[in-house]
Amino acid sequence: MIDATTSHDALSFMDGSSKYNQIRMALVDEELTIFRTPKGIYCYKVIPFGLKNAGATYQRAMQMIFDDILHKNVECYVDDLVVKSKKREDHLHDLRKVF
């Protein structure tokens, strides 16, 4: 990811917040995350941290979201993003594409 930023004048590094907890689980998979507490039995409705495929699922989501600008203005690795611009004056425009 960092190697792809060489020859760019402006870089912005970002870290996603809440990560996997923003991705809804398939209904059939919710029952696989059942846990018990003194107050009842619960299951996750969003991907919890620690599931085996959580990282890969999040990476796929990021690649779909940023598909049109990935490897042009944006590099992505799981929840880390780099917005890169060849010229400083274009950087604000490139950041707006992400947000």
Image (cartoon, rainbow, N blue to C red):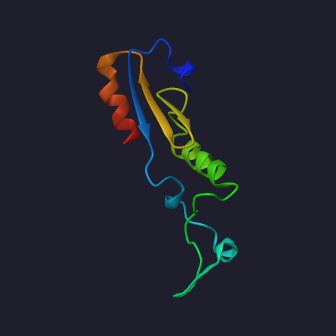
Out of 91 and 59, give the one closest to the viewer. Answer: 59
Give the image location of residue 23, x and y in percent. Answer: 54, 60
**Left or right relative to 92: residue 59:** right
Residue pictured at 41% horizontal, 16% vertical: 86
Residue pictured at 67% horizontal, 77% vertical: 31
Residue extending farthest top:
7
Residue pictured at 54% horizontal, 36% vertical: 76
Out of 7 and 96, give the one closest to the viewer. Answer: 7
Relative to residue 15, is residue 33 depicted above or below? below
The quarter of the rendered structure image containing the N terminus is: top right
Give the image location of residue 58, x and y in percent. Answer: 59, 50
Out of 40 and 74, give the one closest to the viewer. Answer: 40
Residue pictured at 50% horizontal, 38% vertical: 80
Give the image location of residue 46, x and y in percent. Answer: 55, 66
The quarter of the rendered structure image containing the C terminus is: top left
Give the image location of residue 10, x and y in percent. Answer: 37, 20
How many numbered marks are there? 0
Relative to residue 39, is residue 15 depicted above or below? above
Residue extending farthest front:
38
Q: Quadrant of residue 92?
A: top left
